[in-house]
Image (cartoon, grey):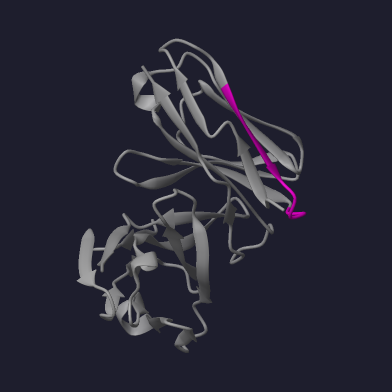
Amino acid sequence: DTAVSQTPKYLVTQMGNDKSIKCEQNLGHDTMYWYKQDSKKFLKIMFSYNNKELIINETVPNRFSPKSPDKAHLNLHINSLELGDSAVYFCASSQPRIGYEQYFGPGTRLTVT
Amino acid sequence: AQKVTQAQTEISVVEKEDVTLDCVYETRDTTYYLFWYKQPPSGELVFLIRRNSFDEQNEISGRYSWNFQKSTSSFNFTITASQVVDSAVYFCALSEESWGAQKLVFGQGTRLTINP
């Protein structure tokens, strides 16, 4: 059984479009995250939700809007896509306390042309 | 702010050699956690180990071992008798508390290539 899943795995779209990436975890975790991995492989947190509530919002453009319909799902919607948004986006989940490892989804490679 | 440095951008060794990946961190917290993740060519991120700041015992898991030294703020990872399947990008990460939640601060990653 897949622990953290993301769809789609690949997303190619044009500048200016709006797109969404979906994430689901079946680990029973309360906390979910979105990370961005750039072309140099650098990983940086974007958002974190705990039990559907936003708790971490790094300096991400407000074109990015996460939504958590329930604690097992955390979706990422991106408006007005730009070339610089091209990256791999990872969803992750963990127990809510400090020190617990985060389990990552397979990633979504977004290419904006 | 927390910071993780993996000074080795790329390492290439021949199969069966031992290899050590360095990780140096900076934090003002007295309690913190360190992690290693593996990203194979297929792209997923695989959790390898977690270590808390109060536990300086070295850990061994098969061919993998980790050396945590608070005095030098290092958490190095050694692969013994490396195999081609160990080829991957390896990330060291440090937990940082933010508004009661945890976020991981990652190092730049070390690309390890094991040649047959």
Closest to the observer, B42 or A64: B42
Please tell me which residue is depicted at 34% across the width and 63% down the height of the picture. Answer: B87
Q: Residue furthest bottom?
A: B57
Residue B40 quadrant:
bottom left
Q: Is residue A48 located in the magenta-colored stretch of the structure?
A: no
Residue B3 quadrant:
bottom left
In the image, is A86 to the left or to the right of A26?
left
Residue A8 % position (x, y): 58, 31
**Would you place residue A84 above or below residue B60 in this image?**
above
Q: Which quadrant is the C terminus of chain B positioned in?
A: bottom left
Q: Residue furthest front?
A: B116
Q: Is residue A100 visible?
A: yes
In the image, is B9 to the left or to the right of B56?
left
Residue A89 % position (x, y): 49, 38
**Would you place residue B75 above or below residue A26 in this image?**
below
> How many marks overall?
0
Q: Which residues are magenta?
A: A20-29
Q: Which quadrant is the N terminus of chain B positioned in?
A: bottom left
Q: Is residue B31 visible?
A: no
Secondary structure mostly seen in magenta is strand
Q: Residue furthest top?
A: A16
Q: Is residue A23 located in the magenta-colored stretch of the structure?
A: yes
Residue A52 % position (x, y): 74, 39
Closest to the observer, A60 or B63: B63
In the image, is B19 to the left or to the right of A108?
left
Closest to the observer, B5 or A88: A88
**Would you place residue A80 above or below residue B108 in this image?**
above
Residue B84 % position (x, y): 34, 67
Closest to the observer, B111 or A46: B111
